[in-house]
Amino acid sequence: MIRVTRAISINESELEFAFVRSSGPGGQNVNKVATGVQLRFDVGRSAAFADDVRERLIRLAGRRVTRDGILVITAQRYRTQERNRQDAIDRLVELVRKASVRPRKRRPTAPTAASREDRLAEKKRRSRTKSARGRVRDDD
């Protein structure tokens, strides 16, 4: 089990790993060994979290989620398969952590009297500045 928060844990059996050849550092090793990791996690079918968290996760992940609701994370930052595998898991955990935080409702507020006065005073100053830019008339 991968512990994400106190309430959310992901069963490792729900994660599917595929190893691919990666770009980046590694020299000749890059062309021979599949060190890149592609982590697949079925967000739609996972019982790990509630519906609201699932919706936020899908929205946060954006294009990394397929039409079928499968989250795909590709990790190829490191030269070893194991470090890339851990990097992919860490990125998944971070994404789920962000999704588990319920966004605060925005409470609309009215501008204060002082801020309204400041705004109007600034508009008047700006108006005077712009009106002073008019053509200079020649009264000859």
Image (cartoon, helix red, strand yellow):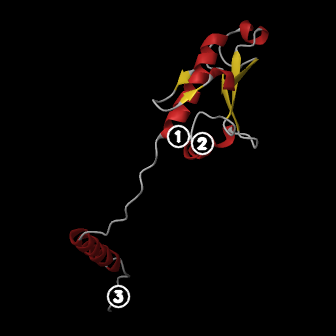
Numbered badge on residue 66: none
Numbered badge on residue 138: 3
Q: Is residue 131 left or right of residue 76?
A: left
Q: Quadrant of residue 76?
A: top right
Three-letter amino acid code of the residue under disc 1: Ala
Q: Which one is nearer the viewer's eye here, 125 or 42?
A: 42
Query: Picture coordinates of residue 73 (x, y %)?
Result: 66, 29
Three-letter amino acid code of the residue under disc 2: Arg
Q: Quadrant of the N terminus?
A: top right
Quick one: label 3, few (<14), some, or many (20+) residues within 10 Å? few
Residue depicted at 28% across the width and 75% down the height: 120
Residue receiving disc 1: 99
Q: Quadrant of the C terminus?
A: bottom left
Q: Mark 3 or mark 1, which is nearer to you?
A: 1
Residue depicted at 57% across the width and 42% down the height: 50
First in sequence: mark 3 or mark 2? 2
User: In this view, which residue lies farthest toward the right?
Assistant: 32
Q: Is residue 41 left or right of residue 99?
A: right
